[in-house]
Image (cartoon, rainbow, N blue to C red):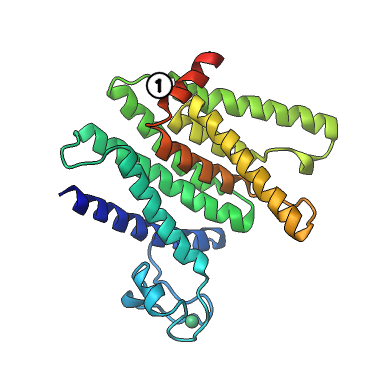
């Protein structure tokens, strides 16, 4: 029975992924993400239902628009698969099964809602180097609901509150001091968008996991920069740190049940 549940979760993940690609394309362009029918971004032809089946349409159409033959960027296809895999990973790590108590289902559902935001933020930050405030607000609302849920089920929420307030405040102060010293805002380590994003991540995962997320994001950023500099000898350019924070947050969320002890340890050392 559980296998059906997991196939369903993977499918839901892919459908969500399909919506993420649409949101990533439309939100920065201030287009409606709920009503207007999808159209090919190259020839503007309205896309029919069968052009929009996640995964399958891309495979059967050979990665091209049916109407103008323009290549559809594989990035969208990959995002759909990744989304399905992340949904599956979260279900596995939390031991999803039919017999799971209701609390477990609610926990997982709220986690999916939060992860949805991280995917859209990742896509938009990667392409536009900005994290829209509307998405931060969305993550904040999901985070508040989740914290209330934790409190209602008897969990401690101190860690979530510290994650929301303290860590971003420290980073903000670091930024502020560096701004005074460097007298150049473009050289600051974190943008305001990144700090706000860290705050809502902290609210959802707690401050121990938040620190871990930031460390992983910095590591990935470092590795990517090293590779890029090695290959293209490029100059340091703008870094979509929100993109790396999203990846790190997803890794931490999936691994959460396994690394609970490490996270508790980080929190104990600091408090
Ligand atoms: Zn087209």
80 left or right, relative to 173: left
The residue shown at (51%, 64%) is: 75
The residue shown at (45%, 20%) is: 264
Hey, which quadrant is residue 233 in on the image?
bottom right
Query: Exactly how many numbered labels are in the figure?
Result: 1
7 left or right, relative to 241: left
The residue shown at (36%, 33%) is: 145
The answer to whether any part of residue 39 appears in the image is yes
Hey, which quadrant is residue 52 in on the image?
bottom left
Hey, which quadrant is residue 174 in on the image?
top right
Is 56 situated above or below 264? Answer: below
> Few, some or many C-alpha atoms within 10 Å of disc 1 (few <14, some 14-19, many ≥20)?
some
The answer to whether any part of residue 32 appears in the image is no
Pointer 1 residue: 157
From the top left corner, tell me how far across and down residue 259 is, in percent: 43, 29
240 left or right, relative to 23: right
Question: What kind of element bears circle 1?
Answer: loop
The residue shown at (37%, 74%) is: 57
Is 196 situated above or below 36? Answer: above
From the top left corner, tell me how far across and down residue 216 is, in percent: 57, 37
């Amino acid at each position: 029975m559980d296998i059906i549940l997991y196939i369903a979760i993977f499918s839901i993940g892919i459908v969500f992924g399909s919506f993420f690609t649409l949101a990533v394309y439309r939100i920065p362009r201030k287009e409606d993400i709920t009503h207007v029918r999808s159209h090919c971004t190259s020839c503007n032809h309205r896309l029919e239902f069968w052009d929009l089946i996640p995964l399958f349409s891309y495979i059967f159409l050979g990665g091209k628009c049916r109407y103008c033959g323009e290549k559809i960027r594989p990035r969208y296809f990959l995002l759909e698969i990744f989304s399905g895999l992340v949904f599956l990973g979260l279900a596995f790590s939390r031991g999803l099964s039919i017999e799971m108590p209701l609390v477990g289902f609610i926990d997982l559902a709220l986690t999916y809602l939060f992860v949805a935001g991280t995917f859209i933020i990742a896509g938009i930050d990667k392409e536009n180097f900005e994290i829209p405030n509307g998405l931060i607000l969305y993550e904040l609302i999901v985070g508040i609901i989740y914290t209330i849920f934790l409190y209602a089920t008897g969990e401690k929420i101190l860690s979530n509150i510290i994650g929301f307030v303290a860590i971003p405040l420290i980073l903000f102060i670091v930024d502020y001091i560096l701004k005074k010293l460097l007298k150049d805002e473009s050289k600051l380590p974190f943008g305001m968008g990144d700090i706000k994003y860290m705050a809502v991540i902290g609210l959802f995962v707690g401050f121990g996991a938040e620190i871990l997320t930031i460390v992983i994001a910095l590591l990935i950023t470092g590795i990517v920069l090293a590779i890029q500099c090695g290959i293209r000898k490029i100059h340091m350019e703008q870094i979509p740190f929100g993109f790396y924070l999203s990846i790190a947050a997803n890794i931490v969320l999936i691994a959460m049940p396994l690394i609970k002890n490490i996270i508790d340890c980080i929190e104990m050392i600091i408090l």
